[in-house]
Image (tube, rainbow, N blue to C red):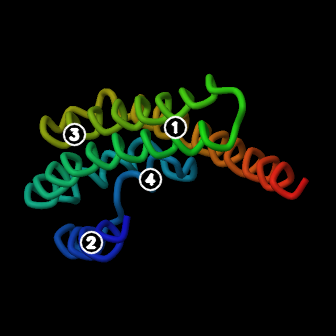
Amino acid sequence: MILFMGGFLPRFTEVVNGNEMIDSYLVDYGKSISDIENLVMDYGEVGRNYMTNFFIWDSIYVVISTILFSLLIRAVTDNKNLSYIPLASGLFDTIENLIVLYTSRTLNMQYIWLARFFASAKAVVLVIIVFIIVIGSIKKIKEIKR
């Protein structure tokens, strides 16, 4: 995450002439599908290539964060089945990334609405994951104090 915030994002913003990452547009329902399409076009070829490289690294982040969230949930809850929930988030993120990657490489905007759906689904699952971790941690702390 530090590498993303300190390295990639400032360079990306420079390469795409100050435009935002597409992820922020996908979950901002104040932005229309046309706004998202225009953003991808405004990136230009260099920006879209830079974004492609980012998605390769982002795939590694998705795998690592999915594993870490699963292990954390397993550590703070008694219901081990809850540790599979981060897999949904990782799957949604991967599908979103593949759609955005396809869109940026082919300039075919036909599926961008689907990327928005998976970005929103990922956000909902992440909120659930954080909720499980917070509640599980509180319960574990109470158990330790007894």
Residue bearing the label numbered 2 = 13
Q: Position of residue 132 (x, y in %)?
A: 70, 41
Looking at the picture, does residue 96 appear above or below residue 34? above
In space, the residues marked 2 and 4 are separated at their CA atoms by: 14 Å
In space, the residues marked 2 and 3 are separated at their CA atoms by: 18 Å
Query: Residue, x 21% and y 51% (percent of image)?
Result: 57
Q: Are dots 2 and 3 in contact, CB under 8 Å?
A: no
In space, the residues marked 3 and 1 are separated at their CA atoms by: 26 Å
Going from N to C along the chain, the mark reached first, 3 or 4, is 4
Q: Nearer the observer, disc 3 or disc 4?
A: 3
Q: Nearer the observer, disc 2 or disc 1?
A: 1
Q: Position of residue 69 (x, y in %)?
A: 51, 44
Q: Quarter of the image holding residue 50?
A: bottom left
How crowded is the residue under tag 3: few (<14 C-alpha within 10 Å), some, or many (20+)? many
Q: Are dots 4 and 1 in contact, CB under 8 Å?
A: no
Going from N to C along the chain, the mark reached first, 2 or 1, is 2
Residue bearing the label numbered 4 = 25
Residue bearing the label numbered 1 = 70
Q: Nearer the observer, disc 3 or disc 1?
A: 1
Q: Amino acid at mark 2?
A: Thr
The disc at residue 101 is 3
Q: Amino acid at mark 1?
A: Ser
Going from N to C along the chain, the mark reached first, 2 or 3, is 2
